[in-house]
Structures are given as C-alpha cells and as structure tokens.
Amino acid sequence: MHRILIVEDEQDIADLIGFNLQRAGFEVLKAHDGITGTDTALRERPDLIVLDLMLPGRDGYAVFRELRRDARTSAIPVIMLTARAQTEDRIQGLQAGADDYLTKPFSPKELLLRVQAILKRAEGTPGTVDLSYGPFRFDKNALKFYIDGQPAELTSTEFKLLLFLCERAGKPQDRNELLRTIWGYSDAAHSRTLDTHMKRLRQKLGSRGSLIETVRGVGYRVAKAAE
Ligand code: CA
C-alpha cells in the first residue's frame, strides 16, 4: 500500500484530500505546519507528498528545498498546492523541481488522478531494468541515471520523461501525448509544465542536453543515437 503525506494547514482541505485518498486505497499521513511536515517526511519516508505552499512555521518552498537536500527524501515525488493562481507561482514550483502542481480550488478526483499517474511512473517497468542510450544509462529499478558513466540527479518526472523519449528515439513525441502519459493531463492547458520541465532537464544534461530536440508544431524528440 502506498503512503501519502499531506502537508496542509487548512484542516478541511487536508481532511477532504485525505478522505478521498484513503477511499482509493492509500494510507494517509497528515501534518498541519511546515516543521512537522518536514519531520514527518524524514521520519516516515512516504511514497508521495502533497505539499501546500502557504504554511505556518516554514513555507512549502522551504520544506521542499530541505526534503530535496536530504538523501532520505530527495527522490520522493511532490505535488505542490497553492491558493495563488498566478502562473509565476506555478512556474516557480516546477522550476524548483516539483513533480506536479495544483491550484486551489481543485477537485479531489483531479488530485487522485495526478497522484496515481506519478506513482505509476515512479514504479518504472519491472523486467526491463536497464536502458542505455548513447551517453545515457537508466537504471529503472533504482531510478538512477548516468551520463557518460557519471551519476546525475534527475527527479522521477525528469527520469520518466527522458526515458520515454529515449525509448522512442528518432521519433518526434507529440506534446499532448507527453502531457497525458507523463503527467496524466487530459487537455493541453498545461503546456508550460512540459516546457518548464524540458528546460530544466536540458540544463541538467549539460552539453548532452542538445540531444533533446524541439520539433516545431509537434513536441520533442531525442535524436537517434550514433553510439
Ligand atoms: Ca495553507
């Protein structure tokens, strides 16, 4: 059973989310301020964290940065929540490396779909553990990634995104298809999510980032490997 930590000071929202996740078969932990949230995450190591940004004690960004810095929690997927609808907040959250982002008010059903999509992709595909592609190597079981033999830090979303492109190398992948497969989105309203992740991913790949090509009017492609 997957365990989900909800860090949210608004009791009714935490209860509503918690109720819906429990009903869908998840075990739920709750914390109502940033400090307790950080402590609970480090102690319990949940499978996923739903993190509100406006929190007493320590705000969500600070909690997020601390969890990403600590090896015990650095790979745990995070969905950020905020009441602020501004695009800039969303972009800031995604640039910080959050796996997904929801603006209040949202439906519990939407959150559930996002949670399920993230956990599904974090599990990888059993049986085919390793994939090598040009300078990249993916260890699907451990979710570890290497560039030219050197370990590199990718979030679970970046890992899945790059793996998806490499498994289909040479073929352009449609933007909407990527949003649907990697994030579980059913419409194109989240286009900037994809571009923000892709920009970050390219930066992390350094000189190898150029292997990801933008295909105008379609989406993205990883060039066929020359080996
Ligand atoms: Ca709040």
Image: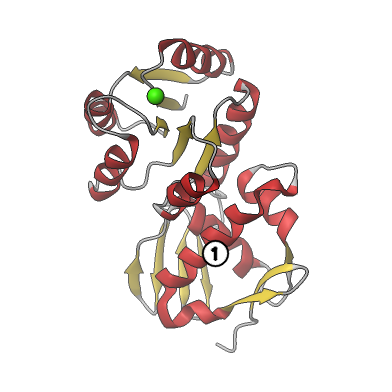
Where does the image place residue 172, in percent across and percent down from the top left? 73, 71
Residue 53's place in the image compared with 29, above or below, is below
Horizontal placement of 53 versus 118: left or right? Answer: left
Does the image show residue 222?
A: yes
The residue where tag 1 is placed is 198
Q: Residue at x 35, y 67 (%)?
A: 152
Where does the image place residue 24, in percent across and percent down from the top left? 59, 18
Does the image show residue 7?
A: no
For ligand 1, the image quadrant comes to top left
Q: Nearer the viewer, residue 119 or 49?
A: 49
Horizontal placement of 33 versus 28: left or right? Answer: left
Farthest residue to the bottom: give it: 226
Farthest residue to the right: give it: 217
Horizontal placement of 122 versus 170: left or right? Answer: left
Residue type pointed to by label 1:
Met
Q: Residue at x 41, y 52 (%)?
A: 97
Where does the image place residue 168, in percent across and percent down from the top left? 68, 68
Residue 1's place in the image compared with 97, above or below, is above
Where does the image place residue 32, in percent across and percent down from the top left? 32, 18
Q: Secondary structure at mark 1?
A: helix
Q: Residue at x 50, y 45 (%)?
A: 90
Q: Nearer the viewer, residue 165 or 183?
A: 183
